[in-house]
Image (cartoon, rainbow, N blue to C red):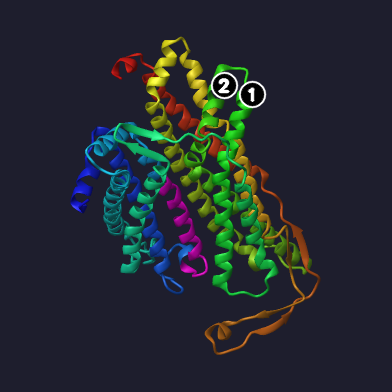
Amino acid sequence: MRPATLVRLAVAGNRTDHLRTALTALSAALAAVTLLAAATVIAIRGEAERYAAALLVESGLRPGVAAALILLSMPVLALTGQCIRLGAPARDRRLAAIRLAGATPRQAVLIAGAETVVAALAGSVAGFGVFLLLRVLLERRDATRLLVLPTDVLPSPVSILVIMLAVPLVAGLVGVVLLRRVVISPLGVVRRVRTGGPWPWPGVLIIAGLVLFGMPKHLGPISGSTLATILSAGVALTMIGVVLGTGWIAHTTGRLLHRFGSRPAMLLAGRRLMGDPWSGSRTLAALLASVVAGAIALGYRAHVQTEFRAIDMYNALLGGDSGQGLGADEGFYVGAIDLIMVAVGIGVAVAAAGVLVTLAESIVARRRAYAALTAVGVPRRTLSEAVLWHTLAPLIPALLLALVSGLGIARLMGTEVSAGTSSGYLCDAACQAGTGEAVEVVTPGAPVTAAVPVPVELLALLGGGALLAMVIAAGIGLLVLRSSTDLEELRAG
């Protein structure tokens, strides 16, 4: 198939297809802008006193800012995957017609993936234009001539090209993965049905991630790049395990609802969860990943606060003020962690928007089934309750798993901290400039040890916020259910 024909078939379709393309392009543009902002922060070199934000001045804190921006782009990219599923029945009929015209199954899947790639590529190009426009609009200096944002630097051309190509490639890969278990035939689209329930093997990934994250303590001195790779791999394995574990959780929840449910809505939700347990892992992936990252950040926040509290206690034992030493900068470091929590909060909101898109799409795709149930006497309230059980029942244990897994990673950083050592080394200005050597300093007194508490209240607030966002998304999605139970849907088919 020629590229021009592939692109022409990819952009064809009805109004719903055009809406899916627009939403995919919009989410790709948001992801491109976020990744370009992260690349801009990484492009800053050395100590940058020209910026008003302290997080951009110090080179040691800029990787945290870039990590927060990259973290923020993850749920936006996941939203791209959710937008791909919008209007799936109409797209399936169009792909079936293309198969009837002589296309092979691989070409049909290629057309569906090309549709996503073209939309995401247009979105990434638009995102680059928005990024340049924002640089012009935000380039303002205050009275001290300090830059508020890094509008004076640009990522390298290679970084820009990689980002603009990576976003559509990832989106296209997601589109192909979503169709991997779909057989596109000339007479329609057939989805393979799972006959057995999933196994809880993702728990092995969670355990492996926790073990890998705690391994550097037992390896001795290693380089910084190796340490970052090991820690990142541990966090990634844990997140993947939590997301994939939602399939087993959904299937188990469905079995419990089907066995012990006393209401028709619980029985309907239980059968749907057992029939497609992996829909939760696809729908809740971005939300659970954001919750895991938030739990890690909250655990590390408690660790940092405990370190400063121990330093204040040690200073008090020496007769100094509690505000001396590093304790005076506690708000600065905690503020950097709070920036990550802001990114997590935005990620949860974006993930909830993706869940809303998926929920509305699933209701529209089953509108004839809902209309048939209404025609035989099933109340609309029962159908609405079934949708809520199907959406929220596996979410609560999945959120608990995400919170516990993220907290487990944070606790591996240490459950207690010490302030004040008997000896150490001080690197003065000459040492930092390379013209001097570190001087050994002996600290009087015994070190102070403090236990790191578990931030139960903040973790509950994080989990409750994610649950509330899902409840709001499910409530808005139920508005689509009312129109999808109209008996006219039976005549339309």
Q: Which residue is mark 2?
A: 267
Q: Amino acid at mark 2?
A: Leu
Nearest the camera: 349 or 275? Answer: 275
Q: Is residue 346 above or below residue 472?
A: below
Residue 140 seen in the current view: yes
Magenta residue span: 57-79
Question: According to the image, label 1 marks what residue?
Answer: 259
User: In the rendered view, does 168 fall on the left or right side of 323?
Assistant: left
In this rendering, the answer to whether 378 lies above or below 268 is above
Classify residue 33 as left or right of residue 193.
left
Q: Position of residue 144 (x, y in %)?
A: 39, 66
Q: Is residue 115 left or right of residue 182?
A: left
- Which of the image's four quarters has the C terminus? top left
Q: Position of residue 322 (x, y in %)?
A: 70, 62
Look at 55% across and 36% down and name the residue there.
467
| Other residues around mark 1 within 10 Å, as few (<14) / some (14–19) / many (≥20) | few
Report the residue at 48% width, 56% height from top.
Answer: 68
Please provide percent x and percent y for residue 288: 54, 44
